[in-house]
Amino acid sequence: MKIHVVHLDATPSRFDFEAGAGWWRAAMREGGELPPELDEPFHVRVSAHRIGDDLFLDGAVEGSLPLECGRCLARYRHLVCEPFRLALEPAGARQPSDPEGVEALARYGMCLAEELETGWYRGDEIDLSGFVHEVICLALPVKPLCREECRGLCPRCGADRNAAACGCPEGPEHSPFAALRALREKSGGGSS
Ligand SMILES: [Zn+2]
Ligand SMILES: [Zn+2]
Protein backbone atom coordinates (compact mmCIF):
# COMPACT_ATOMS: atom_id res chain seq x y z
CA MET A 1 0.00 0.00 0.00
CA LYS A 2 2.76 2.38 -0.95
CA ILE A 3 2.44 5.90 -2.28
CA HIS A 4 5.41 7.69 -3.78
CA VAL A 5 5.55 11.16 -2.38
CA VAL A 6 7.44 12.63 -5.36
CA HIS A 7 4.67 11.60 -7.75
CA LEU A 8 2.07 13.61 -5.89
CA ASP A 9 1.14 17.18 -6.72
CA ALA A 10 -1.78 19.51 -6.14
CA THR A 11 -4.05 17.42 -8.37
CA PRO A 12 -5.42 14.45 -6.42
CA SER A 13 -4.18 11.02 -7.52
CA ARG A 14 -6.36 7.97 -7.00
CA PHE A 15 -5.09 4.70 -5.56
CA ASP A 16 -6.85 1.40 -5.12
CA PHE A 17 -5.20 -1.15 -2.87
CA GLU A 18 -6.18 -4.67 -2.05
CA ALA A 19 -5.07 -5.71 1.43
CA GLY A 20 -5.03 -9.46 1.81
CA ALA A 21 -3.96 -12.27 4.12
CA GLY A 22 -0.21 -11.56 3.94
CA TRP A 23 -0.65 -7.95 4.96
CA TRP A 24 -2.99 -8.90 7.79
CA ARG A 25 -0.55 -11.42 9.21
CA ALA A 26 2.33 -8.95 9.01
CA ALA A 27 0.37 -6.16 10.68
CA MET A 28 -1.09 -8.27 13.49
CA ARG A 29 0.26 -7.62 16.93
CA GLU A 30 0.89 -10.46 19.34
CA GLY A 31 -1.85 -11.29 21.78
CA GLY A 32 -4.62 -9.49 19.94
CA GLU A 33 -8.16 -10.81 19.94
CA LEU A 34 -8.63 -10.37 16.22
CA PRO A 35 -8.94 -13.33 13.87
CA PRO A 36 -5.36 -14.35 12.95
CA GLU A 37 -6.33 -15.09 9.36
CA LEU A 38 -8.15 -13.03 6.79
CA ASP A 39 -10.31 -14.95 4.34
CA GLU A 40 -11.29 -11.99 2.16
CA PRO A 41 -9.13 -8.98 1.26
CA PHE A 42 -9.95 -5.46 2.37
CA HIS A 43 -10.18 -2.71 -0.22
CA VAL A 44 -8.57 0.64 0.38
CA ARG A 45 -9.46 3.61 -1.81
CA VAL A 46 -7.29 6.68 -1.44
CA SER A 47 -7.18 10.08 -3.04
CA ALA A 48 -3.88 11.83 -2.32
CA HIS A 49 -2.43 15.21 -3.14
CA ARG A 50 0.49 17.34 -2.06
CA ILE A 51 0.68 21.04 -1.33
CA GLY A 52 4.26 22.15 -0.77
CA ASP A 53 5.66 19.38 1.40
CA ASP A 54 2.38 18.53 3.08
CA LEU A 55 0.43 15.43 2.05
CA PHE A 56 -3.33 15.13 2.18
CA LEU A 57 -5.08 11.81 1.90
CA ASP A 58 -8.67 10.86 2.08
CA GLY A 59 -10.34 7.59 1.38
CA ALA A 60 -12.04 4.59 2.87
CA VAL A 61 -11.31 1.08 4.09
CA GLU A 62 -13.89 -1.53 3.15
CA GLY A 63 -14.18 -5.22 3.83
CA SER A 64 -15.31 -7.68 6.42
CA LEU A 65 -13.97 -9.93 9.14
CA PRO A 66 -15.24 -13.17 10.62
CA LEU A 67 -16.06 -12.45 14.27
CA GLU A 68 -17.85 -14.32 17.03
CA CYS A 69 -21.08 -12.87 18.35
CA GLY A 70 -20.76 -11.89 22.01
CA ARG A 71 -24.33 -13.06 22.75
CA CYS A 72 -24.99 -16.22 20.75
CA LEU A 73 -21.36 -17.18 19.96
CA ALA A 74 -22.19 -17.69 16.29
CA ARG A 75 -19.54 -16.80 13.70
CA TYR A 76 -20.69 -13.95 11.54
CA ARG A 77 -19.27 -11.54 8.99
CA HIS A 78 -18.67 -8.11 10.45
CA LEU A 79 -18.73 -5.40 7.80
CA VAL A 80 -16.17 -2.62 7.99
CA CYS A 81 -16.61 0.59 6.00
CA GLU A 82 -14.47 3.33 7.48
CA PRO A 83 -13.78 6.66 5.82
CA PHE A 84 -10.54 8.41 6.77
CA ARG A 85 -8.78 11.72 6.25
CA LEU A 86 -5.11 12.34 6.90
CA ALA A 87 -2.74 15.29 6.79
CA LEU A 88 0.97 14.49 6.93
CA GLU A 89 3.85 16.90 7.24
CA PRO A 90 7.56 16.10 6.86
CA ALA A 91 9.09 14.84 10.09
CA GLY A 92 12.36 16.57 9.28
CA ALA A 93 14.79 16.01 12.12
CA ARG A 94 12.02 15.44 14.67
CA GLN A 95 11.49 12.11 16.40
CA PRO A 96 8.12 10.92 17.71
CA SER A 97 7.90 10.94 21.49
CA ASP A 98 6.43 7.42 21.69
CA PRO A 99 8.23 4.17 20.76
CA GLU A 100 5.33 3.07 18.51
CA GLY A 101 5.70 6.29 16.56
CA VAL A 102 9.44 5.79 16.13
CA GLU A 103 8.84 2.24 14.91
CA ALA A 104 6.06 3.29 12.52
CA LEU A 105 8.13 6.08 11.04
CA ALA A 106 10.99 3.65 10.37
CA ARG A 107 8.78 0.82 9.11
CA TYR A 108 6.05 2.63 7.18
CA GLY A 109 7.62 6.02 6.54
CA MET A 110 4.79 7.63 8.48
CA CYS A 111 3.56 7.97 12.04
CA LEU A 112 0.35 9.39 13.36
CA ALA A 113 -0.95 11.43 16.24
CA GLU A 114 -3.38 9.83 18.67
CA GLU A 115 -6.53 10.76 16.76
CA LEU A 116 -5.20 9.30 13.47
CA GLU A 117 -5.85 12.46 11.48
CA THR A 118 -2.48 14.15 11.43
CA GLY A 119 1.05 12.87 11.40
CA TRP A 120 4.54 12.98 10.00
CA TYR A 121 6.19 11.25 7.10
CA ARG A 122 9.80 10.67 6.19
CA GLY A 123 11.43 9.62 2.95
CA ASP A 124 10.17 9.18 -0.61
CA GLU A 125 7.28 6.89 0.03
CA ILE A 126 4.66 6.22 2.64
CA ASP A 127 3.21 2.78 3.32
CA LEU A 128 -0.40 2.75 4.51
CA SER A 129 -0.25 -0.88 5.74
CA GLY A 130 0.02 -0.09 9.44
CA PHE A 131 -2.45 2.79 9.31
CA VAL A 132 -5.13 0.72 7.54
CA HIS A 133 -4.76 -2.06 10.09
CA GLU A 134 -5.21 0.45 12.89
CA VAL A 135 -8.29 1.93 11.23
CA ILE A 136 -9.85 -1.53 11.10
CA CYS A 137 -8.96 -2.32 14.72
CA LEU A 138 -10.56 0.90 15.90
CA ALA A 139 -13.67 0.23 13.84
CA LEU A 140 -14.34 -3.12 15.48
CA PRO A 141 -16.83 -3.26 18.35
CA VAL A 142 -15.74 -4.14 21.89
CA LYS A 143 -18.64 -6.58 22.02
CA PRO A 144 -19.37 -7.93 18.55
CA LEU A 145 -23.01 -8.71 17.78
CA CYS A 146 -24.20 -10.83 14.84
CA ARG A 147 -27.13 -8.39 14.69
CA GLU A 148 -28.51 -5.71 16.96
CA GLU A 149 -31.51 -7.77 18.02
CA CYS A 150 -29.61 -11.02 18.66
CA ARG A 151 -31.39 -12.83 21.50
CA GLY A 152 -28.30 -14.76 22.58
CA LEU A 153 -28.04 -18.06 24.38
CA CYS A 154 -30.36 -19.04 27.21
CA PRO A 155 -28.40 -18.66 30.47
CA ARG A 156 -30.27 -21.70 31.86
CA CYS A 157 -30.26 -24.35 29.15
CA GLY A 158 -27.79 -22.88 26.65
CA ALA A 159 -30.19 -23.02 23.70
CA ASP A 160 -29.79 -20.47 20.92
CA ARG A 161 -32.84 -18.28 21.43
CA ASN A 162 -32.56 -16.94 17.89
CA ALA A 163 -33.50 -20.38 16.57
CA ALA A 164 -36.43 -21.11 18.88
CA ALA A 165 -37.73 -20.18 22.30
CA CYS A 166 -36.54 -22.83 24.77
CA GLY A 167 -39.37 -22.36 27.24
CA CYS A 168 -37.18 -21.55 30.23
CA PRO A 169 -38.72 -18.84 32.40
CA GLU A 170 -37.37 -15.38 31.77
CA GLY A 171 -37.05 -12.97 34.58
CA PRO A 172 -35.36 -11.82 37.70
CA GLU A 173 -34.23 -15.32 38.72
CA HIS A 174 -30.83 -14.60 37.21
CA SER A 175 -30.15 -11.54 39.29
CA PRO A 176 -27.89 -11.87 42.33
CA PHE A 177 -30.81 -10.77 44.46
CA ALA A 178 -32.73 -13.90 43.53
CA ALA A 179 -30.19 -16.01 45.38
CA LEU A 180 -30.56 -13.79 48.43
CA ARG A 181 -34.32 -14.02 48.29
CA ALA A 182 -34.16 -17.79 48.03
CA LEU A 183 -31.91 -17.93 51.07
CA ARG A 184 -34.22 -15.71 53.03
CA GLU A 185 -37.24 -17.83 52.10
CA LYS A 186 -35.44 -21.02 53.17
CA SER A 187 -34.61 -19.57 56.56
CA GLY A 188 -38.24 -18.58 57.00
CA GLY A 189 -37.42 -14.89 57.27
CA GLY A 190 -39.48 -13.84 54.29
CA SER A 191 -42.10 -11.26 54.95
CA SER A 192 -45.61 -12.15 53.89
ZN1 LIG B 1 -25.68 -13.35 17.97
ZN1 LIG C 1 -33.51 -22.23 28.10
Image (spheres, grey):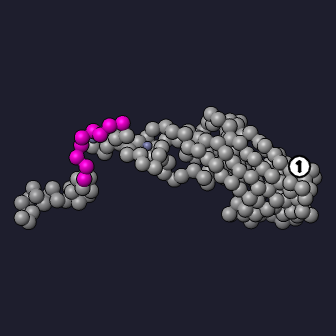
> Foreground: 178 or 104?
178
Residue under the image location 86 percent in, 54 percent down: 12
Q: Is residue 170 magenta?
A: yes
Q: Is residue 7 magenta?
A: no
Say whether residue 11 is left or right of residue 105. right
> Foreground: 71 or 37?
71
Q: Quadrant of residue 89 in the image? A: bottom right
Above or below, 40 against 172 in this view is above
Residue 83 in percent (x, y) is at 69, 54
| Quarter, ligand 2 | top left
Residue under the image location 73 percent in, 45 percent down: 44
Q: Secondary structure at mark 1?
A: strand
In terms of secondary structure, what is the magenta stretch mainly?
A: loop
Residue under the image location 65 percent in, 52 percent down: 82
Q: Quadrant of residue 1 in the image? A: top right
Using the rendered image of the protein, determine whether residue 122 is visible from the camera's viewpoint.
no
> Foreground: 116 or 179?
116
Q: Which residue has dot 1 on it?
A: 4
Identify the image quadrant of the C terminus. bottom left
Residue 62 in percent (x, y) is at 67, 45
In this view, which residue lies farthest toward the top?
39
- Residue type pointed to by label 1: His
Residue 150 in percent (x, y) is at 41, 46
Say whether residue 167 is left or right of residue 85. left
Above or below, 38 against 112 in this view is above
Say whether residue 184 is left or right of residue 162. left
Task: Give the total number of marks visible in the rendering.
Answer: 1
- Give the magenta range: 163-171
Residue 31 in percent (x, y) is at 58, 46
Say whether residue 167 is left or right of residue 150. left
Residue under the image location 92 percent in, 50 percent down: 7
Using the rendered image of the protein, determine whether residue 96 is visible from the camera's viewpoint.
yes
